[in-house]
Image (tube, rainbow, N blue to C red):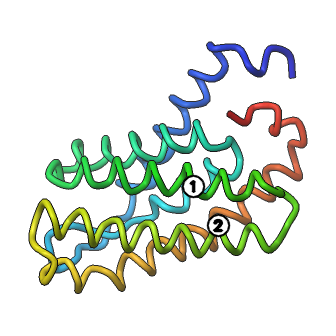
Amino acid sequence: MQNAKSPAIRMSIVAVTTALVAVFTIAIRIPTPLGGYVSLCDVAVTFVSYTFGPITGLIAGGLGTAIADLVGGFGQWAPVSFVVHGLEALIIALIVRINPDSLFYRIVSALVAVVIVAGGYFLLTGAFLVGFGAALPEVPANIVQSAVGVLLGLPLSLSVNKAYRKIDELKW
């Protein structure tokens, strides 16, 4: 792929993947007791991270979920989503980058994603929005959301990488 590292190509990929994350976040929302929701955002976040790397994942994961919260009427959650899903994307992509062909690193990245999402929402929501007692019942839903995200996002990424081998040149 010619000029795959050019700023215009990188900005375009970040813009499209951010929109992808936002759409996956908004498309299906299941309400939770705290007035938030669980969604398919982690499918897109993990797909983008595994496919396009840590920087693209960080920006698209954080910004896409925050935009979805703002547009969808959940503005109070936007900063939490930005931090949690941005960090999730960055860390899992960095773990997989150690050895992209290793099943071990994929499993480790999946477990870390679950911990970051469930733990991140618990800590940030508890500290800044509702208190830790109220945030605790949300943990199981966040575990399910992030686990489903990895279980669907990783195979999707593997399929895309297999079908379009040159996509690795777009990692950032």
Which numbered circle lies on residue 148?
none
At 69% from the left edge and 64% from the top edge, which residue is drawn? Answer: 154
For the residue carrying disc 1, how many other residues have a C-alpha within 10 Å: few (<14), some (14-19), or many (20+)? many
The type of residue carrying mark 2 is: Ser
User: Viewed as shown, does residue 162 lie left or right of 105?
Assistant: right
Q: Earlier in the sequence, mark 2 or mark 1?
A: 1
Of the 4 image quadrants, the one containing the N terminus is top right
Give the answer, above or below, for where 70 lies relative to 148: above
Label 2: state its secondary structure: helix
**Place of residue 101 in the rendered image (x, y in percent of width and height, measured from the top left):** 88, 61
At 35% from the left edge and 80% from the top edge, which residue is drawn? Answer: 141
| Nearer-the-camera pick, 119 or 38 | 119
Of the 4 image quadrants, the one containing the C terminus is top right
**Place of residue 33 in the rendered image (x, y in percent of width and height, measured from the top left):** 16, 80
**Quadrant of res 41:** bottom left
Label 1: state its secondary structure: helix
Q: What is the distance, in whole Å, between disc 2 and disc 1 at their CAs?
A: 8 Å
At 17% from the left edge and 70% from the top edge, which residue is drawn? Answer: 126
| Nearer-the-camera pick, 115 or 46 | 115
**Quadrant of res 167:** top right
Residue bearing mark 1: 91
Which numbered circle lies on residue 109?
2
**Place of residue 98 in the rendered image (x, y in percent of width and height, measured from the top left):** 78, 55
**Place of residue 163 in the rendered image (x, y in percent of width and height, measured from the top left):** 88, 49
At 34% from the left edge and 70% from the top edge, which residue is drawn? Answer: 38
The type of residue carrying mark 1 is: Ile
